[in-house]
Image (cartoon, rainbow, N blue to C red):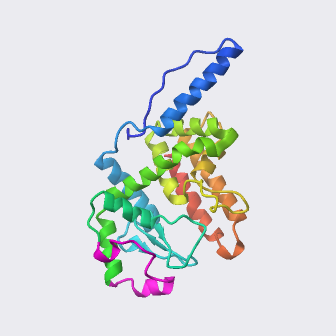
């Protein structure tokens, strides 16, 4: 995988306090540049590989799993990334991503079912009605659309990551340089790239102030801040461990009525896979 790799020149060892300051400033600029630029578009084979892995994690790799509504949720989960679609009048703490996917597919020239051409709220008001309509024409349309647009869905997820990264410097505050450095290191390997791509779809960018429990988020930004500096572990291994800690904290902070503890082991297992 080459599409996020960016190389940077080595800097000389500082010999004075002035050069230390200059070196830190230059290094920060290099990391920022590496964070926001991608060298190449992913190949079709790379998109397929990423898509299969995300599809397996979210939907068990099945076409039937492309249209889901999880127990205890108030939204449909659609596509390989289980993109969220809220019914009319429903608002939740999680960012709605399915309408944005539809806009993306339109921009890529994908032919949509007529009823989906103007994306409104999810047509099923709750999980029961959604399940009753599982074999209806609209959900069959959705599964056909989503099963033939895997590469487009992966490009949408990558675009979501690329839009988020330039915002992290301001959002990270005093941790900005640490976040920049972690992104730079992760982008040097296929495992590190996949970890960021999958996690930003799995648990969001970490920028939405509504996606917080007791004031603490669980998105990609929070994982990048949480990553420690253990030099013996690879960046992907450090990311995997940090993600597990962040999600454990999320469950601890979550409202008891959501019952999120039932998902934690599965989440941690998924994150462990990032280590490569």
Residue 98 vs residue 263, the one in the foreground: 98
In this rendering, would 147 be left or right of 234? left
Could you tell me residue 45's position as x and y percent?
30, 49
- The picture quadrant where one finds residue 121 is bottom left
Question: From the viewer's perspective, is residue 275 above or below residue 5?
Answer: below
Question: From the viewer's perspective, is residue 274 above or below residue 254?
Answer: above
Numbered range of the magenta stretch = 113-136
Residue 196 vs residue 174, the one in the foreground: 174
127 part of magenta stretch? yes
Could you tell me residue 87's position as x and y percent?
49, 78
Q: Main secondary structure of the magenta part?
A: loop
In this rendering, would 17 be left or right of 81? right
Question: From the viewer's perspective, is residue 49 above or below residue 32?
Answer: below
Q: What residue occupies the far top of the structure in this picture?
A: 15
In this rendering, would 155 be left or right of 259? left
- The picture quadrant where one finds residue 234 is top right
Q: Image point 30% across, 69% down: which residue?
A: 145
Quadrant into which the N terminus falls:
top left
56 part of magenta stretch? no
Could you tell me residue 161's position as x and y percent?
48, 49
């Amino acid at each position: 995988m080459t599409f996020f790799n960016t190389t940077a020149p080595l800097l000389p060892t500082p010999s004075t306090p002035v050069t230390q300051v200059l070196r830190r400033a230059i290094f920060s600029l290099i990391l920022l540049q590496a964070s926001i630029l991608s060298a190449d578009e992913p190949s079709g084979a790379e998109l397929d590989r990423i898509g299969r892995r995300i599809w397996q994690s979210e939907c068990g790799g099945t076409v039937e799993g492309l249209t889901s509504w999880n127990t205890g949720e108030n939204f449909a989960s659609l596509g390989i990334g289980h993109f969220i679609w809220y019914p009319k009048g429903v608002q939740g703490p999680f960012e709605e991503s399915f309408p944005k996917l539809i806009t993306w597919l339109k921009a890529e020239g994908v032919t949509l079912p007529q009823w989906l051409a103007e994306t409104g709220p999810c047509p099923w008001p709750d999980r029961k009605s959604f399940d009753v309509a599982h074999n209806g024409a609209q959900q069959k349309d959705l599964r056909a659309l989503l099963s033939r647009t895997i590469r487009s869905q992966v490009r949408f997820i990558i675009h979501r990551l690329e839009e988020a990264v330039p915002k992290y410097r301001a959002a990270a505050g005093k941790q900005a340089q640490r976040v920049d450095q972690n992104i730079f290191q992760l982008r040097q390997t296929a495992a590190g790239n996949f970890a960021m791509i999958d996690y930003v779809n799995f648990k969001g960018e970490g920028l939405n102030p509504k996606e917080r429990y007791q004031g603490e988020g669980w998105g990609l930004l929070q994982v990048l801040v949480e990553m420690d500096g253990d030099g013996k572990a690879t960046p992907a291994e450090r990311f995997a461990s940090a993600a597990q800690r962040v999600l454990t904290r999320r469950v601890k902070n979550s409202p008891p009525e959501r019952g999120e503890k039932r998902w934690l082991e599965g989440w941690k297992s998924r994150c462990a896979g990032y280590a490569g």
